[in-house]
Image (tube, helix red, strand yellow):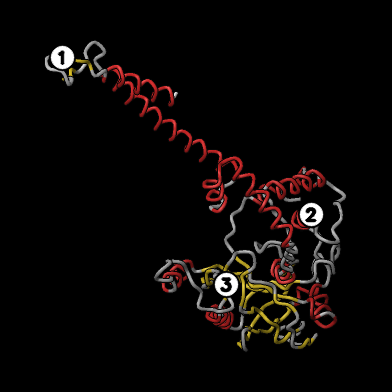
Amino acid sequence: MPDVSEILSKPVNRLRSKVQRGAVGSVDREGGDNGAGLISDFSVITRGEALGHEMWCDAEFLQQVHDAINAAGKAGLKARFTHPGLSADGLGKFLGNIKNAYMKGDQTFADLHFSKSAHNTPDGDLANYVMDFAEEDPDKFGSSIVFMQDRKAEELFHVEHKNEDSGEFESPDSDNEKNYEHCRLSKLYGADIVDDPAANPDGLFHRGQEIPQNAELLLNYAFKIEGSEKPSQFDFGIDPDRLSAYVDRYLDNHNLKIVSKGEPEEMANETEAPSKPEVNADEIRSQYTAELNKYVSKFGAEHGVKWLGEGKSYSEALEAHVDVLGGKLAAKDKQIEELNEKIASIDLGEDTPLESGQAGEKKSSGKGAKGKYDAFQALHRFK
């Protein structure tokens, strides 16, 4: 078995389009340039998402694919047989060549000319297997191109379609709802003919592909894909149950959930708005009256009604009440201070002389003593 670290450490330098299924014209077992078989008019690519890379294949990209196939001339471009779970970096079996591309609607079509060698491989007769599959179960027959992107052209397209206000990229393709960047073709390597993953688990395409196949089985089990079973052997030194438990914890810690494509939108459409509770007017009136009495008895009519009307909570009203009381105490302290100053200013040792009705006779008015008495009385009231 190949070294897993060597395979998985390689960077991705080729992209794959989304698998196109069900578009097969006709099968001629003795046709083609080599007389080894021909599948005519199969769908090479359809406008839409490039598989797993958040890139969009638009009409211009389809035209580039069409031109690249026909530019290969009589030799055509390589076609391989693979499983949908495998990477696009050489893990395929040679079938023949694709030629004679043409465009129709949102798709690019071509013909697959089988090689004679595809009838006699270490894995069996791949050519007849693929032709049988195309005839008997065309809905599961699929293809996916393998290509290198033109990053400079993609960057230029991005700049040309920026929103002037937000600066964000806006796809001119109305079907590109997620505003994926648009693919531009640098090089087309060929097309992979893809079967159904359940159709051939241990047959034609099994030998030499244990790593990607076992990796898919392990991930299916860890992510609890419907119909998945626990792998019988521990590839990569990973226990399936431990990996599954780790995935569960990771999703739970990050408040994530795995759902099928389209399911979130369906769930959102099906979710009913929560029903509003029934309103009992008498109960609400009784609760409000009790709350009002509570505020008035504690804070007085003026402030109790005001603070309840302003929506203050009881704790907020208590804080406001403390502020009011503090203000009143401060005012009293100031008045007491003023009275103390007044008392201190009175001269207790002298009376203001006033003339009496008799000549030469003087009497004291007693205003000094009386002022002191009045000040003490006022001070006593505040204390």
Tag 2 secondary structure:
helix
Above or below residue 306? Residue 273 is below
Examine the rendering and report whether any part of residue 71 can be seen. no
* Front label number (1 vs 2): 1
Of the two numbered discs 1 and 3 on the same chain, state the one appearing first in sequence: 3
Q: Which quadrant does the C terminus fall into?
A: top left
Q: Give yes or no for contact between labels 1 and 3 (Cβ–Cβ under 8 Å).
A: no
Structural crowding at the residue carrying mark 1, measured as other residues with C-alpha within 10 Å and reported as few (<14), some (14–19) or many (≥20): few
Q: At 38% from the left edge and 25% from the top edge, which residue is drawn?
A: 378
Of the two numbered discs 3 and 2 on the same chain, state the one appearing first in sequence: 3
* Front label number (3 vs 2): 3
Residue under numbered circle 2: 214
| Image coords of residue 340 (percent x, y) | 33, 21
Indicate the quadrant where residue 351 lies. top left
Above or below residue 122? Residue 297 is above
| Image coords of residue 369 (percent x, y) | 30, 16
Q: Give yes or no for contact between labels 3 and 2 (Cβ–Cβ under 8 Å).
A: no
Structural crowding at the residue carrying mark 3, measured as other residues with C-alpha within 10 Å and reported as few (<14), some (14–19) or many (≥20): many
Instruction: In this rendered view, identify the residue nearer to me: 67 or 287.
Output: 287
Residue under numbered circle 1: 361
Q: Which mark is residue 247?
A: none
Residue under numbered circle 3: 56
Which amino acid lies under the numbered mark 3 shown in the image of this protein? Trp
Tag 3 secondary structure:
strand
What is the C-alpha distance between the residues marked 1 and 2?
131 Å
Which amino acid lies under the numbered mark 1 shown in the image of this protein? Glu
Indicate the quadrant where residue 294 lies. top right
In the image, is 43 to the left or to the right of 37?
left
Which amino acid lies under the numbered mark 2 shown in the image of this protein? Asn
Instruction: In this rendered view, identify the residue nearer to me: 270 or 16.
Output: 270
* Front label number (1 vs 3): 1
In the image, is 221 to the left or to the right of 264?
right
